[in-house]
Amino acid sequence: MATLYLASASPRRAELLQQIGVPFDIRIYPIDETLLPGEQPAAYVERLARAKAKAVLETLTVPACVLGADTAVVLEGRVLGKPADRDDAIAMLEALSGREHQVFTGVAVLDRTSCRVEVVDTRVRFRRLRRDEIEAYWATGEPCDKAGAYGIQGFGAVFVERIEGSYSGVVGLPLCETAGLLEQFGLYGWRPEA
């Protein structure tokens, strides 16, 4: 069986893979994550998931599979990346306040002969947020490295009024779809006890 590499520095993605009992090593290789002109959010996360996995695969000299993933928070067609600073984070959270947005997560699993990709679209609705709680949330440090300036698995959970779709996809790795992709490569499956 080939070794699985996770092409991500995200501790959240690593925790999710561990949660379903998949053994893996972490290997990252930086890529350009710039949104292309006119690129749709689903195509964007799919492209980045493939590119991250492919970049790592090209550094390996042993038989392996690589899992790459990317998540984008999207409000009215606009991709909200990681905030540049405090003001950017506050502006993002104010824009999300009292509204529904989408979270797209692309997952790619590949080896030297094939590549399988899934893109999961989840809808998240925030309750109306007060400015003081947005500022207090910024002070926790949590929004700094999160797309859309929030983490649903942390303090940001109190903002979420409703979710339709994959909770783990919003965290950064949709487990149902990821398990299905890994199974196609013989890297996941329920094993009855002997």
Image: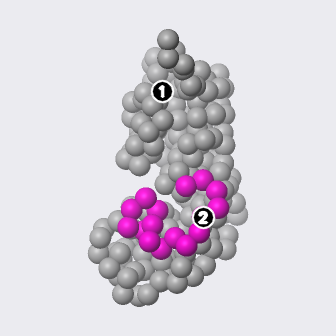
Identify which residue, 71 or 129, lies in the foreground. Answer: 129
Task: Say which amino acid is labelled 2.
Answer: Ile
Is residue 158 covered in magenta? yes
Circle 2 SS class: strand
Task: Say which amino acid is labelled 1.
Answer: Leu
Residue located 53% across and 47% down the image: 173
Q: Is residue 22 above or below residue 73?
A: above
Which residue carries the number 1 mark? 4
Residue 99: name its quadrant.
Answer: bottom right
Q: Residues within 10 Å of mark 2 (few under 14, many from 20)?
A: some
Earlier along the polypeptide chain: callout 1 or callout 2? 1
Residue 14 at x, y percent in the picture:
41, 41
Residue 18 at x, y percent in the picture:
42, 36
Q: Is residue 148 above or below residue 1?
A: below
Are the residues at dot 1 and dot 2 in contact (C-beta closer than 8 Å)?
no
Which residues fall within the magenta stretch?
152-167
Residue located 52% across and 70% down the image: 160
Real-space Cα separation, disc 1 to disc 2, in angstroms? 31 Å
Describe residue 33's horizontal placement relative to residue 41 as left or right: left
Is residue 178 covered in magenta? no
Pair 1/2: label in front: 2
Q: Is residue 86 above or below residue 26?
A: below
Which residue carries the number 2 mark? 163
Residue 21: name its quadrant.
Answer: top left
Residue located 32% across and 79% down the image: 136
Identify which residue, 38 or 10, lies in the foreground. Answer: 10
Circle 1 SS class: strand
Residue located 57% across and 46% down the image: 174
Identify which residue, 29 or 151, lies in the foreground. Answer: 151
Residue with the most extreme bottom position:
131
Color scheme of the displayed model: one colour
